[in-house]
Image (spheres, rainbow, N blue to C red):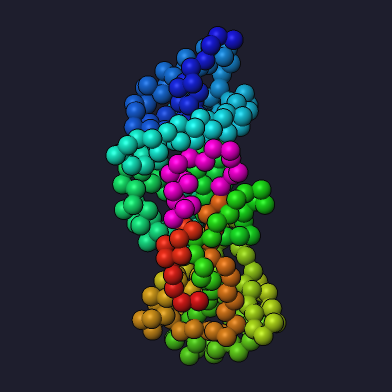
Amino acid sequence: MAEVDLADLDAFAAVARARGFRGAARLRGVSASALSEAVRRLEERAGVRLLNRTTRSVTPTEAGRRLLERLAPALGEVTAALDTLNGFRDGKGLIGTLRLNVPGIVAREVLPPIAGRFMARHPGVVLEVAVEDAFVDVLAEGFDAGIRYDESIARDMIAVPLGPRRQRYAIAAAPAYLAAHGEPRHPRELLAHRCIRHRFANGHTLPWELEKDGEVVRIRPEGPLIANSIEMEVAAAVQGLGIIGSFEEMLAPALNAGALRPVLREWWQSFPGPYLYYPSRRLMPAPLRAFVDLLHEPDSRWEGAA
């Protein structure tokens, strides 16, 4: 096979991950035609088609998928190696890009103050955040790290807590709903109520788990609405359509305004906050190392009432 340019391999990986030339071009700050030419050149030198192109989509072929699986870690090592040079740029400070994949709740409620401190300290670093609730292979998708809750993190990942506080899963309903249907006194009574449920990106609707004095009750409530939008779910609950279960932070504005009332508050289960996770690599990108160092500072983590 003819000699392959590293830049062409990088272009192919960007297009394959973005599932399109335009999306990859926006992320890379180059033209789509330049990426197309790089991929065409790579395919010619490799002697095999790497991407299937249609007017609507771009997807890796079997050969392309296998190449991407092997290529992503190698490109990550190259990026990390180059990032180690940042510390030698006298007077310029840290530079580079930190790419994070985070769920919506973290993007809204947890990450902003931490990100603000990080960007203020390292103005030369570009923080790129992709918000999606589905669990992804961060390395294969081109991210430096991800943020998820502990039960979703593979055991071979390094995990660093974003904050010392615990979060709670809250249950609430509109005053009008409780006046019309009564207020449950035990979690099992929720089975007789109209409940509003959330469908996650993986297609699952999780059971509600409540706990009090060591007693754990897990139920699968039924109701008139299942959505993948917490905003729609809260709006429906405020309208009195049913009882909602969600992160306490997501319900707090409606609870504070009196539009929702706590239900079974003494049963609300707490759980550890989210973690930053990343693969164990010999060379860690300098921006990621700086972000991890920030998280290890006690006053830099997310604070709030338990």
Q: Of residues 66 and 294, which is closer to you in this image? A: 294
The answer to whether one can see residue 236 in this image is: no
Residue 207 lies in the magenta-colored region: no
Q: Residue at x 61, y 32 (%)?
A: 69
State the image quarter where residue 26 is shown.
top left
Residue 43: x and y in percent read 53, 16
Q: Residue at x 63, y 77 (%)?
A: 210
Q: Is residue 18 above or below residue 167?
A: above
| Name of the residue lying farthest toward the top | 2
Q: Residue at x 49, y 58 (%)?
A: 296
Residue 163: x and y in percent read 49, 64
Q: Quick check: 66 left or right of 3?
A: right
| Name of the residue lying farthest toward the left | 91
Locate the N terminus by quadrant: top right
Query: What span is in magenta?
Result: 278-294
Q: Quick check: 268 left or right of 213?
A: left
Residue 166: x and y in percent read 54, 71
The answer to whether one can see residue 235 in this image is: yes
Residue 51: x and y in percent read 53, 24
Q: Residue at x 52, y 41 (%)?
A: 284
